[in-house]
């Protein structure tokens, strides 16, 4: 019986040694896997947060640029409407001034021709030298100041046409410059929008990729944690340490061997 107990204890020692080797290898590999997967999960999570923040930043910048482009286009539309209205008004004023000049020039010509001819005598009725006046050529002042007034009016029409034309040219030049600058500014902003939109799309693609990697890595980490929980009852939670159990078993075997020798009459 003592021999059987000794053999049994030795078999238990060998089995536990093999089990200890298995546990040490599995626990070491499992810990390495858990540490590696946990570190990878943290890395992927941080990368996802970083790309999410970048995506939101790009979305805000795209929105701001798009709003600025829309606002500038509205200003262009307003400027175009005002320019068209002002141009129509100036064109009308210039046309009226030109028509006025033609009318005044025609009136002056008619009066000059009239006073230079015999018909001018009709305006001189009641004078004592009617016959003499009819024979005299037209002289300034013979019209009672009408010619001078018409010449002033003609000059005013000419000045109005010149000033309005100059104002129209200046307004058109200013409008053209504003539109050119606005178009250039819009083109630059649109280029930025295009670049940022492409960067945002790449960011979204990266987030999708990172999400899949995180899902896979998290599943692997969960599997490693589950396996660790399965190892714990046999490899971790055993009360006494492996060294203590080996020492106690060794003491028990030695005691049984001593008892066996005493009972068999052999020297220890």
Image: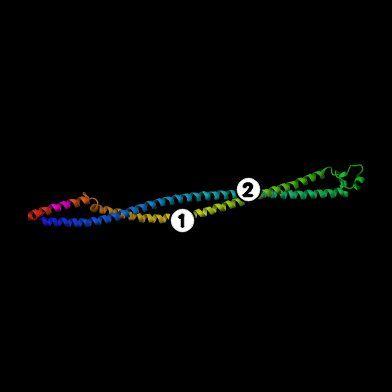
- In the picture, the quarter occupied by the C terminus is bottom left
Q: Residues within 10 Å of mark 1 (few under 14, many from 20)?
A: some
- Colour scheme in the image? rainbow
In magenta stretch: residue 173: no
Q: Quadrant of residue 123?
A: top right
Residue 169 image point, x, y percent: 68, 50
Residue 7 image point, x, y percent: 14, 57
Relative to 121, 230 lies left or right: left
Q: Disc 2 on helix, strand or loop?
A: helix
> Is residue 217 or residue 63 the one in the foreground?
217
- Residue at 40%, 50% (x, y): give it: 46
Most extreme residue toward the front is: 267
- Residue at 63%, 50% (x, y): give it: 177
Q: Are marks 1 and 2 in contact (CB under 8 Å)?
A: no
Relative to 174, 101 lies left or right: right
> Is residue 70 or residue 189 the one in the foreground?
189
Relative to 59, 260 lies left or right: left
Residue 103 image point, x, y percent: 77, 49
- Residue at 43%, 50% (x, y): give it: 50
Decide which of tag 1 and tag 2 comes sooner along the chain.
2
Q: Residues within 10 Å of mark 2 (few under 14, many from 20)?
A: few
Mark in front: 1 vs 2: 1
Prevailing secondary structure class for the magenta stretch in the rendered image? helix
- In the picture, the quarter occupied by the N terminus is bottom left
Residue 39 image point, x, y percent: 36, 52
> Is residue 225 or residue 170 the one in the foreground?
225
Q: Disc 1 on helix, strand or loop?
A: helix
Q: CA distance from mark 1 to mark 2?
A: 43 Å
- Mark on residue 202? 1
Q: Which residue is mark 2?
A: 82
Magenta segment, which residues?
248-255
């Amino acid at each position: 019986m003592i021999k059987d107990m000794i053999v049994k204890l030795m078999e238990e020692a060998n089995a536990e040694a093999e089990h200890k080797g298995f546990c040490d290898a599995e626990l070491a590999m499992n810990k390495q896997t858990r540490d590696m997967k946990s570190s990878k999960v943290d890395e992927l999570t941080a990368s996802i947060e970083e790309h999410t923040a970048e995506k939101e930043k790009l979305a805000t910048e795209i929105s701001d640029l798009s709003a600025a482009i829309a606002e500038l286009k509205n200003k262009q539309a307003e400027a175009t409407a005002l320019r068209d209205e002002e141009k129509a008004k100036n064109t009308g004023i210039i046309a009226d001034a030109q028509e006025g000049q033609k009318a005044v020039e025609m009136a002056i010509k008619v009066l000059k021709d009239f006073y230079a001819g015999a018909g001018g005598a009709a305006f001189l009725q009641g004078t004592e030298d009617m016959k003499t006046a009819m024979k005299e050529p037209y002289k300034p002042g013979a019209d009672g100041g009408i010619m001078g007034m018409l010449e002033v009016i003609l000059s005013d029409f000419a000045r109005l046409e010149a000033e309005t034309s100059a104002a129209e040219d200046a307004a058109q030049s200013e409008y053209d410059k504003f539109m050119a600058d606005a178009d250039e500014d819009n083109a630059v902003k649109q280029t930025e929008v295009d670049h940022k939109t492409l960067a945002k799309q790449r960011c979204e693609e990266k987030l999708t990729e990172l999400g899949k990697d995180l899902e896979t890595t998290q599943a692997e980490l969960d599997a490693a944690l589950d396996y660790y929980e399965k190892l714990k009852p046999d490899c971790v939670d055993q009360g006494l340490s492996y060294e203590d159990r080996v020492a106690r078993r060794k003491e028990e075997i030695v005691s049984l061997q001593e008892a066996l020798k005493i009972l068999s009459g052999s020297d220890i």
